[in-house]
Image: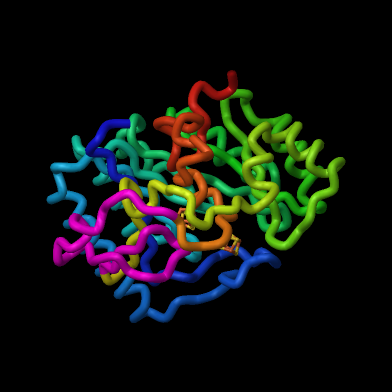
Amino acid sequence: MSSDDLYVLYRGPLASCNYDCPYCPFAKRVDPPELLRADRADLERFLGWVRETTDRRLSVLFTPWGEGLTRSWYRDAIVELSHLPHVARVAIQTNLAARTTWLSDANPQVAALWATYHPGQVTPERFLSRCSALSEAGIRYSVGVVGLPDHYAPALALRAALPSDVYLWVNAADGHVYTAEEERRWTALDPRFGDSVRPHLSLGRPCHAGETAISVIGDGTVRRCHFIPAPIGNLYDGTWRAALRPRACSNAMCDCHIGYVHLKPLKLRDVYGDGLLERIPTGWPS
Ligand code: SF4
Ligand code: SF4
């Protein structure tokens, strides 16, 4: 990490998804055409900001509410940003339902995917064929599951089928309290499950969010992170620059990976290094 690094999480208005996960409010949601047009226009504007902001080394993670890679504008954005010299990483959270051949136009040193496996929505064969295609194309990606009891057997099978150099993460399921035995077996699948299994007490603790990491929504509103609603500036009027400074967390807890990776006492930037946004620990599988 260098002093001009800035991590940017971007989330536009898009909230539709082709999958129907029982644990998700965006399941099978359809966005009206005007919302899709707005999402595309907002993303274009964001791309313009990235192109012009050459004095920072930018790492961008798209965290759509729904699925972005079924939309051409997210695919095109990843391809374009991956070729910009001041962009260190561009990644997206995806269910990996869409074909990935478009990534052949991207720079594999920069483009990456955070892929989530949703058992019940896709066959293991189909999901694994997507993973194989990414491996063959030399694209960096992590694969993960929500740690629900029903997901354990599919996750075990997935781990066994994936190449060992592909990191498989497990997210603790919202509201689920894990027994010691459950924690042990999920940790055997993902040695970093301990980061996720319980929320982190964060109130008053220093966090990189708002200093070297920001969250941006479609209209350019900048927040420290996705979890603290108070805006700290806007991307498009330049006020984001003056807003960046060391800060302590104002929430009681931080329980989402894309948040607590920035919580300074956890030192997770040391764990993930260049793989921070796509969730691949440095040197995995060592
Ligand atoms: S794939 Fe993701 S966004 Fe889509 S329904 Fe499942 S959890 Fe929700
Ligand atoms: S600890 Fe989490 S909630 Fe608090 S500022 Fe950091 S990312 Fe946001």
The residue at 27%/39% (across/down) is 5
Report the span colored magenta. 220-248
Taking 121 as reference, is 264 left or right?
A: left
The image quarter containing residue 43 is bottom left
Viewport quadrant of the N terminus: top left
Taking 135 as reference, is 40 left or right?
A: left
Residue 33 visible in the snapshot? yes
Q: Is 12 drawn above or below residue 74 in the view shown?
A: below
Q: Position of residue 203 (x, y in %)?
A: 52, 57
Q: How many marks?
A: 0
Q: How is the image coloured?
A: rainbow
The image quarter containing residue 221 is bottom left
Tell which of 70 and 50 is nearer to you: 50
Residue 69 visible in the snapshot? no
Q: Position of residue 144 (x, y in %)?
A: 62, 44
Taking 123 as reference, is 106 left or right?
A: left
Q: Position of residue 38 (x, y in %)?
A: 30, 74
Magenta stretch holds residue 247: yes
The residue at 49%/70% (across/down) is 16
- In the image, ligand 1 is in what quadrant? bottom right
Tell which of 240 and 170 is nearer to you: 240
The residue at 53%/39% (across/down) is 266
The residue at 45%/45% (across/down) is 262
Taking 171 as reference, is 131 left or right?
A: left
Q: Is 36 drawn above or below residue 50 in the view shown?
A: below
Q: Is 218 drawn above or below residue 33 in the view shown?
A: above
